[in-house]
Image (cartoon, helix red, strand yellow):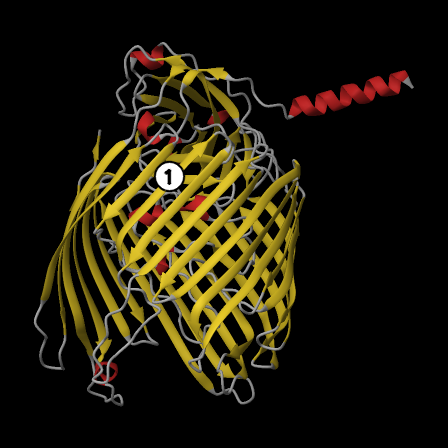
Amino acid sequence: MIRIFTVAVVAILLARSAHAQPSPFNVTRAAQPPTIDGVLDDATWQQTEPMPTGEWKSYNPSRGDLMPDAYRTDVRIAYDDRNIYFAFYCRDNEPDKIRTNVAKRDSAFNDDWLALSLDSAGTGQSAYHLFTNPSGSQMDALNTSASGEQFDADMLWFSAARTTTDGYTVEVQIPLQTLRFKGGDAVRMGLVFFRKVSRIGVSYAWPEMLPGQWVFDRPSHLVFSNLQPRRLVEVLPSVTYNVSQARADEASWNSADDKYNFGASGKFGITSGITLDGTVNPDFSQVESDAFQVEVNQRFPIFFSEKRPFFMEGMGLFNIAGAGSGDGNMRTAVHTRKIVDPIFGSKLTGTLGKTTFGVLNALDDKPSMLASFDSSGRPLPVPNRAFTVARATYALRRSDYVGGILTHTHLDGRHNLVAGGDVAIRPSSSQSVNASLLVSRTTGSVSESGVPQDLGGISAQASYGYNTRKVTIGGQVEHYDRDFEMDTAFYNRTGFTSAWTYNEYNFYPKGGTNFWLQRVFPFFFGRAGHDRVQGGNDDFIHTGIRFNTTRQGFISLGYMNGHETWRGRRFRLANTVNTFGFIQAFRWLGVNAYYNGGYSIFYDFENPFQGRQSNAGFNLDFRPNQHLTQEINVNTVRFDRASNGERIYSVNIVNAKTTYQFDKHFLVRFLAQYDSSAKRVLTDLLASYEFVPGTVAHAGYGSLYEHSSEFLNRPRLPSDKYLMINRGLFLKASYLWRF
């Protein structure tokens, strides 16, 4: 018995040691700062020993395969009173096959790259993710335990990289003002490294990321001796000039309308962990137009991403557990695109011990909910809409947390108040559980018949995940009352209860080698629920098989079948063929394509009917050299009446974008978009220079064309053509002062 017990104890200890966290690494203070040029010949790096990283292992698409010695990566770290420095020596036995491009920020993910995840506060709740490709082009994200990676934010840091005869080298400089941490004699920060080898399509990490885990679960730790934060003070003045002109009729234009806009934003570090952001009279115009999407016969609202810098930064903190994951109903608890034209905005965000918090306020000058007109058809003054969002999380263990959220909007006597909480826990290394509950109260609203009414309701969800190298199991149960309303959120519908599950089983043919077929996984997705608004039940299954290959290849072959209730009638939903995939066919060409077809619904409120729909599309990413990129995206939809084959509609969407990146700061881009359903063509020419995030200059010209029959609101004639109906020029400049 004693022998058995001893053997069991030894086995447990060995198992624990196999996944033990690395010992803390004491970072060397630099006698003089290195020059960030991508060349590792500085005295700092010559005098700094490599960090003992040990074995890097794969996490995508395969799990746990040892990184070949041909890709051995050395890491050196140093710091001083102003910055933290990293130097990477990334070896590659086939350097001529390294894929790299001179690209604008956040657009080089199909290249080879090197990245780090730095949890500067050491709370296990948020981390800075900084990526650099071998040309020094940057990608960055703020990762939170509630929202995962959010690439909206652009942080101020510096990088340089160069290819060599045996790989590539990277240098990174992170100003202490960019980071949030509590100073002291021994400051600890969590750290994970990543590296992607594009041609084999495999990403590696150190320390190893086990299945179902992420950067907060098993990081290494850096220790900085006598490191003190630097107070963050930023001022960002901006000026914008716009001139626009609209067509009056087929032969003439209205007078041009031009305007200047002067604004200012700023950041102030109240403490080392708390920052106040503010903006007054901001210009929140988008530099790049939204891509056209299919908007015909859509049951649910179409989501457009936020592209305005003030609202992009740090918004992952304001999301809640379960939102934006899997097939859930709520995409995000705070969708700032609902703030149309703010007069001012403010954000207070920070960390106090284990508590991370944020408060967002904005006053919207042009709320989209009201459109009132007098008896002559002239628009009436619209009241401003006030937004307030408060969010806080308390760290429990690693990435585990409990949180709360409060949102309030006020518009013309109508108040919408939502309060709730969420929790996320990992009971074991392979399991995750989260849940959230929201309670809404809306007062001062008016029914469709004009009767004043007060509304209230709840939404709740619970999710579970189980992930090992072989098996993935996930699911969610959610409930929404009919009268639940959350003005700040983006969600599809209310008045239903449903559940979904996703399961897959993984096979790894010749794992750990460069065999072309890396992973094979059959999968099953199922969803069922009851819709109290539409008056019936929904059910749906999607099953098939998927493959990962070298060259970042991914192929999915599936079958879909189910039913959906709409306006009290039960309709069939089915795709006898459902396939999509991507492959980096050559260093200069990436191809993405999809096709599905089967039974669908024509979502008419008075006369819905069963139809058959086919969807097809492709995306080409063509890069003949490191500076030029041509992207072409084509989507087509065909919808026929199922009973007699009558064609109800056809939609063709084309989005094309040509970009020439002179260096990582300066680009010229031409955008052309076509929507056959709206009979619109949009063109957009932009020249953009970004020295660092905030210090930018843009010059652009855009035009919108519409078919003359649409513009003149008459039947189509053979002589009709596309008319330019709007045109405009804009100039924008801003400069970041960091004190």
Q: Quadrant of the N terminus?
A: top right
Say which residue appears at 32% left-offset and 38% top-offset.
276
Residue 68 in view of the camera: yes
Residue 107 in view of the camera: no
**Residue 290, percent across and down?**
32, 60
Instruction: Please tell me how many numbered marks the rendered image carries.
Output: 1
**Residue 421, percent across and down?**
55, 48
Say which residue appears at 44% left-offset and 61% top-offset.
416
Judged left or right of residue 699, residue 318 is right
Residue 611 sits above or below residue 545 on the image:
below
The residue that mark 1 highlights is 140
Residue 174 sits above or below residue 657 on the image:
above
Judged left or right of residue 67, residue 372 is left
Q: Nearer the viewer, residue 169 or 374?
A: 374
**Residue 23, percent across and down?**
55, 17
Report which quarter residue 62 is drawn in. top right
Q: Quadrant of the C terminus?
A: top left
What amino acid is at disc 1? Answer: Asp
Q: Nearer the viewer, residue 318 or 220?
A: 318
Judged left or right of residue 538, residue 113 is left
**Residue 442, percent across and down?**
47, 65
